[in-house]
Amino acid sequence: MLSKPILMKSFIFYLLLLFSLSVTAENIVKATRVWPAPDYTRVTIESSSAISNDQMMLKDPERIVIDLKRVKLNEALRKLSSQVDVLDPNIKKIRVGQFNPKVTRVVIDLKASASVKIFSLKPIKKYKHRLVIDVYPKEIDELASLLNQLKKKDNGQQSTELVIPEIKKSIIIAIDAGHGGEDPGAIGAKGTKEKVVNLQIAKKLKKLIDKEPNMKAVLIRSGDYYIPLGKRVSMARKIKADVFISIHADAFKKRAVRGSSVFALSERGATSAFAKFLANNENEADLIGGVSIDDKEPILARTLLDLSQTTTINDSLKLGNHVLKEIKKVNKLHKKYVEQAGFAVLKAPDIPSILIETAFISNRKEERNLRSAGFQQKISRSILKGIKRYIKNGQVLAFYTEYE
């Protein structure tokens, strides 16, 4: 029979062996994706564990070199090369190869000089560990520009990018199609992705608005890519939007739940448990879509110190009520009043903003409706009618009195 000291030594040796095996275990890449957007291109590498990596920026030609440690070249990585769109404004091509037995090298050939952000995301929902490479053209790095403006203001300097506001000839409606890119939003029983129907409805609404005299719509997201929640708000402020409409589709564990809803921001907590649940769910989008620490600069928090939001919230409630009255003619309402909660995407301090849950994608009947072009058109038309009622009732600035 073995003595206790020998057994203890054997046990310790076994633990050390397991530890060494876990440390040297191969990290498997599960999927890769490339998301081109107007402002940047995102490359995502999803793996079984966090990827340790080294990066280099090289010139002549411009390229990014990323060495993935403890990663072997596989089919998922090889697919990166074929995912680059020829119309991508930032990336020319991606090359992948086994640099040495323990390192896979990814080379991203650029079309021009660029600034790059590389960061890791922890597992969330259906995603495992992700390494994210965001490629921004240097000349239109909008986040850097916004931060630079804030720094200049803090230092008492006049920003060269600030211009005298021009007299607007149109009421500008910012339309935000929720989710996108890495973040599909809710998914229906038939596989319908919320991000897809949100964009389809947003585009239909834009077409209707653009036909109206003295009105112009701008899509915050025009394709399948992700925009951080705070940046959606800053984009709306940059275009001097008069109204902000965020389009979504509900989901709940009980499939029988159905109906359309309209939400405004609350500074004092949610008006119901469901509103709080929904706000938490929507605010989680930045974790799913993927936002680096650098993108979490308190741009909105800084502006909130200078501007009171109470008046804007009151206007948002008025806008929401007008829209709700029109939507109920198209679909059953989940709640008969505008609810409130702490939605991050509604935090523009000076733009009346509402979030519309057009229907429950988790409800089989409403999922079918959301896939229907006819239903999308009806919902879009009802939203437009609500906006027009809001404008007609004098809620927009005085120089729009000539409208209607």
Image (cartoon, helix red, strand yellow):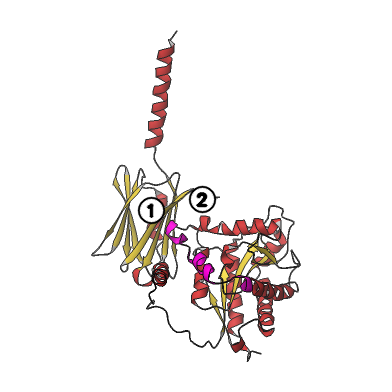
Q: Farthest residue toward the left? A: 60
Secondary element at tag 1: helix
Q: Is residue 161 above or below residue 299?
A: below
The residue under label 1 is which amino acid type?
Answer: Arg
Q: Which residue is mark 1?
A: 78
Q: Residue at x 31, y 59 (%)?
A: 64
Q: Earlier in the sequence, mark 1 or mark 2?
A: 1
Q: Quadrant of the C terminus?
A: bottom right
Residue 378 visible in the current orientation: no
Q: Residue at x 45, y 61 (%)?
A: 295
| Mark linked to residue 294 | none
Q: Which residue is mark 2?
A: 127
Q: Quadrant of the N terminus?
A: top left
Q: Give how far across and how far down residue 183 sits, in percent.
A: 53, 59
Q: CA distance from mark 1 to mark 2?
A: 20 Å
Q: Residue at x 39, y 73 (%)?
A: 156
Residue stretch in magenta:
293-312
Q: Farthest residue toward the front? A: 156
Q: Farthest residue toward the bottom? A: 402
Q: Quadrant of residue 360?
A: bottom right
Which residue is more in the foreground, 43 or 150? 150
Which residue is more in the foreground, 180 or 246? 246
User: Which numbered disc, 1 or 2, marks the residue closer to the eye?
Assistant: 2
Which residue is more in the foreground, 308 or 168? 308
Residue 194 visible in the current orientation: yes
Residue 24 as seen in the image, left or right of residue 207: left
Q: Is residue 296 magenta?
A: yes
Secondary element at tag 2: loop
Q: Is residue 362 above or below residue 324?
A: above
* Dominant SS in magenta: helix
Classify 10 Å Cα crowding around label 1: few (below 14), some (14-19), many (20 and above): some
